[in-house]
Image (spheres, rainbow, N blue to C red):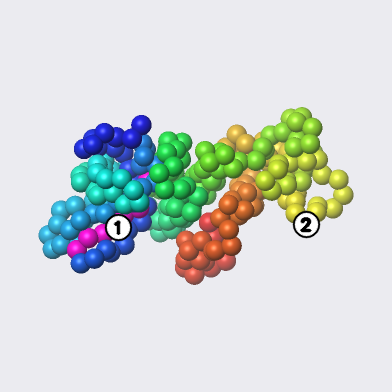
Amino acid sequence: MTPARGELGRGYVLQTRPWRNTSMLVEALTADAGRIGLVARGVRSRGNRTRPLLEPFQPLLMAWTGRGELRTLTTVDAERWRAPPAGRALLAGFYCSELVMRLLGRDDVNPEVFEAYDAVITALADNGPAEPALRRFEIELLDALGFAPPLDCDVGTGEPVQPDIDYDFLVEHGPAPAYGPAGSEALRVSGAHLLAIAHREFDDADVLRSARRILRASLAPHLGSRPLKSRELYRSMYGGGST
């Protein structure tokens, strides 16, 4: 339910950019209103006390007025303060924000997306292992948006995936038992890895590698041909690997 006029709701800043002389445009992800565009008036004025709050990855309490593409931010406060992610975790956070910006439409209310984003940013800020947190976020995001293919059943028969055989994962469809060489449109993966990914069990490095391949392929049709800026930035800073 969208917060009533003046009522504070939970939110995160996804992106900001300057607007006019002293104001700022804010893309926010909120628990109750989805992704929304806000005008933060006067926050770039000297001495403004609101501007320091409008940083990415900080859990906020926000209120706004208006309708349409852009609403007016009226109140913002810190829900709780925490140190933001740093280093590679910071770039991982930007990657998660970019996925939300690209895949969740304006005013699409989706509490599951907000909870998945809150969980991954919390994990990254706590300096835990970044890659398991990212893979959980990707699969939760795909699931919340209705894009997640089945992972634990044979796409052809509906039978449960067996851990001791290999499967060809068909993007946007799911796994089918592997016969002969892997086709150009399929990813060869063990049933054990598919089951681990389906259950969000990412303790094994080989499972993580399989998850990265499968989830990147599953996201690609929905992201389109335009590259993710966060991936390009990661490559420029850290070399061949990326989110």
Residue at the (53%, 56%) spot, across then down: 243
User: Which element type, helix, strand or loop, lies under badge 2?
Assistant: loop
Q: Which residues are magenta?
A: 22-29
Q: Check disc 1 and report the residue beneath it.
A: 25
Q: Is residue 56 visible?
A: no
- 32 left or right, relative to 179: left
Q: Residue furthest bottom?
A: 236
Residue at the (73%, 47%) spot, across then down: 170
| Residue 63 percent across, percent down from the top left | 24, 42
| Residue 75 percent across, percent down from the top left | 20, 44
10 Å crowding of disc 2: few (<14), some (14-19), many (20+): few
**Mark pair 2, 1: CA separation:** 43 Å
Mark 2 touches mark 1? (CB < 8 Å): no
Q: Is residue 84 magenta?
A: no
10 Å crowding of disc 1: few (<14), some (14-19), many (20+): many
Residue at the (72%, 33%) spot, across then down: 153
Mark closer to the observer (2, 1): 1
Residue at the (48%, 54%) spot, across then down: 102
Q: Is residue 219 above or below residue 20?
A: above
Dominant SS in magenta: strand
Residue type (three-letter) at the residue carrying disc 1: Leu
Q: Is residue 23 magenta?
A: yes
Q: Is residue 205 or residue 221 the one in the foreground?
A: 221
Q: Check disc 2 and report the residue beneath it.
A: 184
